[in-house]
Image (tube, rainbow, N blue to C red):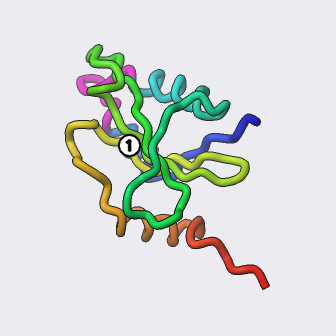
Amino acid sequence: MRKLVVSIPDFDNQVKALSKPKKYPKLPSDLKSFKQKLAVGEIASKRARGVSSAPVFGARVEDSSTGVGKSGGFRVLYFESEDKYILLFIDRRRELDDWPSDMILRILKELGLWPPEATN
């Protein structure tokens, strides 16, 4: 089943900052390819650590601007719902060891994504 792929404004701002001409000009096209593959479930990812049972995953995105591929490229953190993927963060793989779990959970709560509302 194909899912919709959307992003939060902070993610879009991070992409804009990273894709400035002298940094990583091919990032938008790399992300387009990533989103197409993610939408149909062709992306290998790992559950984010420390976010309880929230469906938050991290995946690698290649960096064709520098030719380092996925291993030295970017990391994308996303939330998975029943019908869509919501892109939350992107960073250079070598710039940050891990995303702080308290920050992830706070943002999910602010966006109304987690925890799920209790049903009566």
Q: Is residue 3 above or below residue 10?
A: above
Q: In this image, 69 relative to 30: left or right?
A: left
Q: Is residue 37 above or below residue 64?
A: below
Q: In this image, 11 relative to 94: left or right?
A: right
Q: Nearer the viewer, residue 60 or 11?
A: 60
Q: Which residues are magenta?
A: 18-26
Residue lying farthest to the bottom in this orientation: 120
Q: Residue at x 37, y 44 (%)?
A: 14
Taking the magenta stretch, the answer to whether it contains residue 25 is yes
The secondary structure that dominates the magenta segment is loop
| Location of mark 1 (residue) | 90
Q: In this image, 47 relative to 101: left or right?
A: right
Rendering coords of residue 85 (x, y %): 60, 46
Question: What is the three-letter code of the residue carrying label 1?
Answer: Ile
Q: Is residue 26 above or below residue 57?
A: above
Q: Residue at x 44, y 47 (%)?
A: 77
Q: Quadrant of residue 12?
A: top left
Residue lying farthest to the top in this orientation: 67
User: In which quadrant is the C terminus drawn?
Assistant: bottom right
Taking the magenta stretch, the answer to whether it contains residue 44 is no
Q: Nearer the viewer, residue 49 or 38?
A: 49
User: In which quadrant is the N terminus drawn?
Assistant: top right
Helix, strand or loop at label 1? It is strand
Rendering coords of residue 42 (x, y %): 59, 28
Residue lying farthest to the right in this orientation: 120
